[in-house]
Image: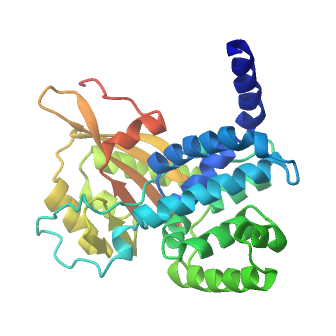
Amino acid sequence: MGNSTIEQDRAFQELVDPYRRELLAHCYRMLGSIHDAEDLLQETYLRAWRSYDDFEGRSSLRTWLYRIATNACLTAIEQRGRRPMPSGLGAPTDEPERPVFASPEVPWLEPVPDTVLDADPSDPATIVAARESTRLAFIAALQHLPAKQRVVLILRDVLKWKAAEVAELFDTSVASVNSALQRARAQLEQAAPERDELAEPTDPEQRALLERYARAFEDADIAALVELFKQDATWEMPPFPQWFSGIDHIARLIAAQCAPSPGDLRMVPTAANGQPAFGMYRRGPDGAYHPFQLEVVTIADGRISHVAAFLDTTLFPYFGLPEALPAG
C-alpha cells in the first residue's frame, strides 16, 4: 500500500511539474509577490493532488491547474488585499531631506527574477511577451484592478484564453467576461499608459548607460548620476511610502538619505520583471559589503525614467545574489 501511494505521488508529480514555472508566473501576476506566489503554487499543487481523482479530463490538465491556481489566488487576494507601490498611494514628496519612515504594515509589491518568466528561450516572440506581461509597471497597474477583473485580463490578454473558457471558470456569461475585460483594459491604460523600452540586455547603448549608472553610485558621483536620469524621472523605495519625482528631488534624496562616500557601495547587475536591475551592497564596519537594496531600473528615451529600490533584502537569494561581497 505504501509503495503504491509513493508511485501515485511520483506519477502525479511527473504530470504537473512541467507547468510549475508558468503557474508560478501566473500566481506572481495575480499577487505581485514572489513570496506569496511560491506559497500559492504549493497550495495549488496540494489542492490538485487532493482532488486529482475527481479530474475527469473534460479540460486539459494545464487548464485544470490554472483554474485551481486562479481560485487559490482569488482567496488570497480577498484575505491579504492588493500590493501597491508608493506611487500608487499618493502624491510625491517635495522635501527629500526630511527623514523617511517605513510602513512595514503595508504589503508592498515585490519584484520577481527573470528566471520566473515563462518563455521559450528559442522563441524571441515569447520572450518579449513574457517581459511585457511581468514588467514592474504592468504588475503595479494590475494591483489597481478588482480581483476578478485582474483575473479576466490576465487570462484573456496574457494567457490568451477564450472568453468561453473564462466564463466557465467564473460560471458566468461570455458577455459578462467581455464587459469585465473592457473595463479592466480601460483602467489599466489609465494606471500605466506609458510603455518602457524593452531593449535587449545586450543592447550596447543600454549596457553602457547601466554601466555608467553603477559606476556613478560606486564612485559616489551624484553629478554623473544626475546626467543619466530623465528630467521627470521617478524614484520610490518600498517599504517607505514616500516617493520622489524629478531629477532635482532624486539627486537631493540620494545625497541626503544615502550620502555615500566613494567605495561605500557595490552594484551587482541582475534582471527583474524583464528589466535591468542591481543588487546594491553597502560596506559595513567589518569592511565587507552587505545587501542594502534591490534596484529595478526603467529606461525610456535613452535615459533612466524610474527606479524602484526595494529595501527588503530577503529578496536577494531569489535573484542568485551573494549574501555578502568581500572587503576590497
Q: Residue furthest right?
A: 58
Residue depicted at x 54% and y 85%: 190
**Residue 164, quarter of picture:** bottom right
Looking at the picture, tell me which residue is in the foreground, 45 or 202.
45
> Where is residue 182 drawn, in percent x and y?
69, 85
Is any part of residue 304 visible from this angle? no
Residue 183 figure quarter: bottom right
Q: In screen coordinates, is 244 left or right of 102?
A: right
Q: Is residue 143 left or right of residue 198?
A: left
Q: Which residue is at a point 22% across and 27% down the rendered structure image?
A: 288
Q: Is residue 324 above or below residue 96?
A: above
Q: How is the image coloured?
A: rainbow
Q: Is residue 158 visible?
A: yes
* Residue sitting at the far front: 1
Question: Is 264 drawn above or below residue 132 in the view shown?
Answer: above
User: Is residue 280 positioned above or below 153 on the image?
Assistant: above
Q: Is residue 143 above or below residue 278?
A: below
Q: Residue at the location (22% across, 60% down)?
A: 254
Horizontal and vertical percent position of residue 217: 30, 49
Q: Residue at x 61, y 59 (%)?
A: 71
Which of the image's four quarters has the N terminus? top right
Instruction: Name the image quarter holding residue 287.
Output: top left
* Camera-nearest residue between 302 and 269: 269
Considering depth in this image, is 197 or 184 the residue closer to the camera? 184
Where is the C terminus found, in terms of image quarters? Answer: top left
Q: Residue 114's x, y, as percent?
A: 58, 45
